[in-house]
Amino acid sequence: MKWLWTSRADFERDLAEELPGGRVLAPALVIGDALKPGSELPVFGRQGFPIAAEVAPTVEAVVAVLRPLLPAAPAAWSLHVWVPDSDGGNPLSAQATELAEGVTKALGSAGERSVRAHELYDPAEPIVQVCLAESGRAYVGAQPLSSTVSLWAGGRARMKIPSGAPSRATSKLAEAIAWIGYGPESGDVCVDLGAAPGGWTWLLLRRKTRVIAVDRANLQPDIARDRKVLHLRDNAFTYRPEEAVDWLFCDMVWKPAEVGKLLAMWGEKHWARYLVSNIKLPMKRRLSMVNDVKRLLAAGGWREIRARQLYHDRDEVTLHARR
Ligand SMILES: C[S@@+](CC[C@H](N)C(=O)[O-])C[C@H]1O[C@@H](n2cnc3c(N)ncnc32)[C@H](O)[C@@H]1O
């Protein structure tokens, strides 16, 4: 069965390159063969599902596909009707909402709900996805919740950040922690390379950690004043920790291969147990650059290395690894 995938707009070719039989269908939409069991999820795939049918975007047509796919009386199921995050896809959002309401009504309301991230759920519960494409067609599929790529509709993991957080970067780290599934805990020591103005440090402080924030630029004053922050105006490439820490965070706008070498050195020296790093991507050869950086990390002894372009990432990807 073919799968429908969505990426950030302008990254569909990178996603197609990653997928078996991948081909670009439209801006932000890619079609491909099913991944081999056990293979890694694609870096540039925000969301994906197996296509049961491609139909006209009407309630009747979608329901006709879904009836045989859903158990007769599912105790609970989830429905995501989403549009590609592209100039042609986003204007279809109102139509998607209408279609979702119609399908929900037609299939009976008992137990229906939307998936909320972090909510406890039964992994065998079915989730139905419908993608409204700008071609005027709807792609429909159902699968167990446990096999969904993202719990957010269309993979748009919008993080709501309380006011007071200094930058968009805070959302990137919040999403990274949600993606990884765990994060720094109370009492952990974190190094934040490229910390200014302090979005990541701010979030780390909310998790009751101690933060060594390395950046020649200023931190937001309330963050710099926090007793749990040590701000060092050092160059991240020459900074050496006095002792090993729990977490290494890195968010510098710098050449990915050089950042990769720096992170590899932290691995070799056992200076941190866990790593979260944002890597800025070049204009071309983006997938091979991600793979180059992953190889550098592996050579530095990092394990379980994963990379993903998160919803809040622009021309960048987020890496996670443990030592
Ligand atoms: C995208 S910003 C980081 C945003 C930050 N994560 C936040 O949440 O507010 C990149 C930062 O990297 C810093 N930076 C770039 N090169 C650096 C270096 N060699 N050493 C230390 N900081 C560096 C810049 O000064 C800049 O503040």
Image (tube, helix red, strand yellow):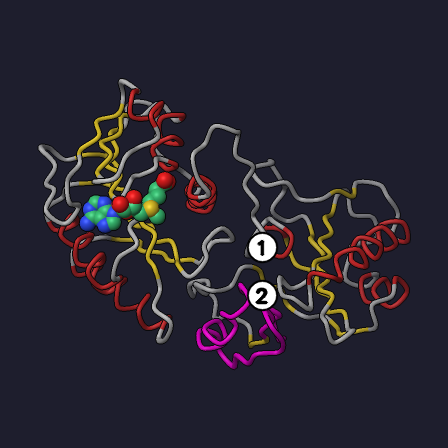
Q: Quadrant of residue 121?
A: top right
Q: Position of residue 146 (x, y in %)?
A: 57, 51
Residues at circles 2 and 1 in contact by the CB criterion of under 8 Å: yes
SS category of the residue bearing label 2: strand
Question: What's the residue at 47%, 44% (across, down)?
Answer: 175
Taking the image as shown, residue 181 lies to the left or right of residue 92, namely left
In magenta stretch: residue 252? no
Q: Which residue is drawn at the image coordinates 59% and 52% (left, top)? A: 156
Magenta stretch, residue numbers: 1-30
Q: Quadrant of the N terminus?
A: bottom right
Residue 195 drawn at (x, y percent): 29, 39
Q: Quadrant of ligand 1?
A: top left
Comparing 146 with 283, the one in front is: 283
Query: Is residue 273 in sight in this rendering?
Result: yes
- CA distance separating discs 2 and 1: 8 Å
| Viewer-side residue, 290 vs 220 | 220
Q: Image quarter for residue 90? A: bottom right
Q: Is residue 320 left or right of residue 67?
A: left
The residue singled out by tag 1 in the image is 155
Q: Earlier in the sequence, mark 2 or mark 1?
A: 2
Residue 7 lies in magenta, yes or no?
yes
